[in-house]
């Protein structure tokens, strides 16, 4: 999710994993602005509350509550008279279920994987398909890691599609789905997938936030941001609020400990700065940009900083509708489509707005993948393949409809 308002303070000792034993996630039905305002007061509480889905009128709010904050939570629910129910009884139990087995190094789609295992698989694919796959280092991180991806090309002069994964560290289904798409582009025997794959060049980066992703494996499974220190106690900006187009004009925070902290300036984090430079270097090579997040089952397009609609809004909505219709056919997974600001909330400084606003790319979408809150950020690994399958179905439909509407332009 794009807007997670507060930090949850948990006990971290050295490199030990933070524990979320008996933390609960509640769904709250919010119908009035005063209810939203009361819930937003929790943003001033740095200990024990974390919004997984942010307060908005007539939207489901998902709130994680620490055990010691339960009395305060129930008191507030009684005060604002908001219906609520438990979505997740024990957050730690789901963390334990989705954590990959210790020592797992072989890449597959039965488990989530560490950054090293993902990167090794990218290298292995480049060796296995030397005429089609080239590893690319697009950027770097505060802690000195590479932001590694691949370029996949089946023939010269194809139009390009850029795929961004894992900009928010805790959203593990994002890198997993991006890797699934990559493998399908190389191995699928489905004629429609083959046609899509071989008619495009692909620039695919499973993790835009490697430091944060590693931190979710070593220290705090629910970490969202980058890892650059801001001040003495706060770490990281929200890398999806740090891009230099309409930066920090709404839906972001100036508080360095906030999970939606916009950073000290546009591109204040080296991850966004270096990847923006790489994207600029290939900006004439691609016409479509896709970003993958979780969760909520949404397919959205710019803008996030304003509800003003794009000049090609009707085309984008129609392409989105075709895509989510195709996505639903396999497993019945229902998505909604629309622009970011109208569909969820205002969110400035995101990567999609930057790509659209800077280069006016005609096809730009963000996926909020499964689910709608039953598991939230802790989607079981047995849903990796189904998520990948239905997402691949939607991409086939997306680019068929985009082509029918004249994209890319000749």
Image (cartoon, rainbow, N blue to C red):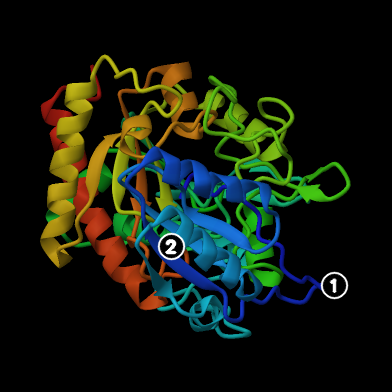
| Marking on residue 173 | 2
Measured Cα–Cα span from mark 1 to mark 2: 27 Å
Q: Is residue 281 above or below residue 166?
A: above
Question: Which residue is drawn at the image coordinates 40% and 78% (left, top)?
Answer: 110
| Dot 1: element | loop
Q: Is residue 105 visible?
A: yes
Relative horizontal placement of residue 287, taking residue 64 as reference (left or right): left
For residue 343, side relative to residue 276 (left or right): left
Q: Is residue 48 left or right of residue 3?
A: right
Q: Position of residue 375 (x, y in %)?
A: 40, 70
Using the rendered image of the protein, determine whether residue 127 is visible from the camera's viewpoint. no
The residue shown at (21%, 38%) is 320
Q: In the image shown, does 144 or 60 lie closer to the viewer? A: 60
From the top left corner, tell me how far across and down residue 135 is, in percent. 54, 49
Residue 217 is situated, as x and y percent measured from the top left of the image, at: 64, 70
Q: Please give left or right for residue 141 compared with residue 83 in the image.
A: right
Count of residue discs: 2
Residue 67 quadrant: bottom right
In the rendered image, which residue does mark 1 sit on? 14
Q: Nearer the viewer, mark 1 or mark 2?
A: 1
**Which image quadrant: the C terminus?**
top left
Which element is circle 2 on? helix
User: Who's the residue at 40% across and 43% down the image?
Assistant: 56
């Amino acid at each position: 999710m794009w807007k997670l308002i507060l930090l949850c303070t948990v006990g971290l000792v050295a490199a030990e994993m933070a524990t979320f034993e008996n933390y609960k996630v509640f769904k709250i039905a919010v119908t009035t602005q005063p209810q939203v305002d009361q819930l937003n007061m929790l943003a001033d509480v740095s200990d024990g509350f974390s919004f997984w889905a942010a307060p908005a009128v007539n939207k489901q709010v998902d709130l994680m509550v620490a055990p010691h904050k339960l009395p305060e939570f129930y008191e507030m629910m009684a005060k604002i008279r908001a219906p609520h129910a438990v979505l997740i009884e024990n957050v730690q139990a789901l963390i334990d279920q989705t954590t990959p087995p210790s020592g797992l190094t072989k890449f597959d789609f039965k488990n989530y994987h560490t950054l090293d295992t993902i990167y090794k698989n990218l290298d292995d694919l480049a060796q296995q398909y030397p005429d089609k796959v080239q590893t690319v280092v697009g950027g770097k991180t505060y802690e000195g890691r590479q932001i590694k991806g691949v370029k996949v090309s089946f023939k010269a002069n194809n139009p390009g599609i850029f795929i961004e994964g894992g900009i928010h560290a805790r959203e593990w289904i994002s890198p997993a789905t991006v890797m699934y798409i990559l493998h399908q582009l190389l191995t699928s025997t489905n004629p429609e997938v083959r046609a899509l794959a071989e008619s495009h060049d692909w620039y695919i980066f499973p993790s835009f936030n490697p430091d944060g992703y590693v931190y979710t494996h070593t220290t705090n499974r629910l970490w969202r941001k980058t890892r650059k220190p801001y001040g003495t106690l706060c770490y990281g900006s929200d890398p999806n609020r740090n891009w230099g187009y309409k930066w920090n004009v709404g839906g972001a925070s100036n508080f360095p400990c906030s999970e939606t902290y916009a950073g000290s300036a546009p591109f204040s984090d080296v991850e966004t700065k270096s990847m923006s430079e790489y994207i600029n270097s290939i900006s004439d090579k691609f016409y479509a940009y896709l970003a993958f997040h979780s969760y909520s089952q949404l397919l959205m397009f710019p803008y996030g900083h304003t509800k003003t609609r794009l000049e090609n809004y009707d085309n984008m909505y129609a392409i989105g509708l075709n895509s989510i219709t195709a996505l639903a056919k396999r497993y019945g997974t229902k998505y909604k489509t629309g622009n970011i600001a109208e569909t969820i909330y205002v969110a400035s400084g995101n990567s999609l707005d930057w790509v659209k606003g800077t280069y006016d790319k005609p096809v730009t979408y963000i996926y909020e993948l499964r689910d709608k809150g039953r598991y939230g950020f802790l989607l079981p690994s047995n849903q990796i393949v189904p998520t990948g399958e239905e997402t691949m179905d939607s991409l086939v439909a997306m680019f068929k409809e985009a082509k029918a509407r004249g994209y890319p332009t000749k």
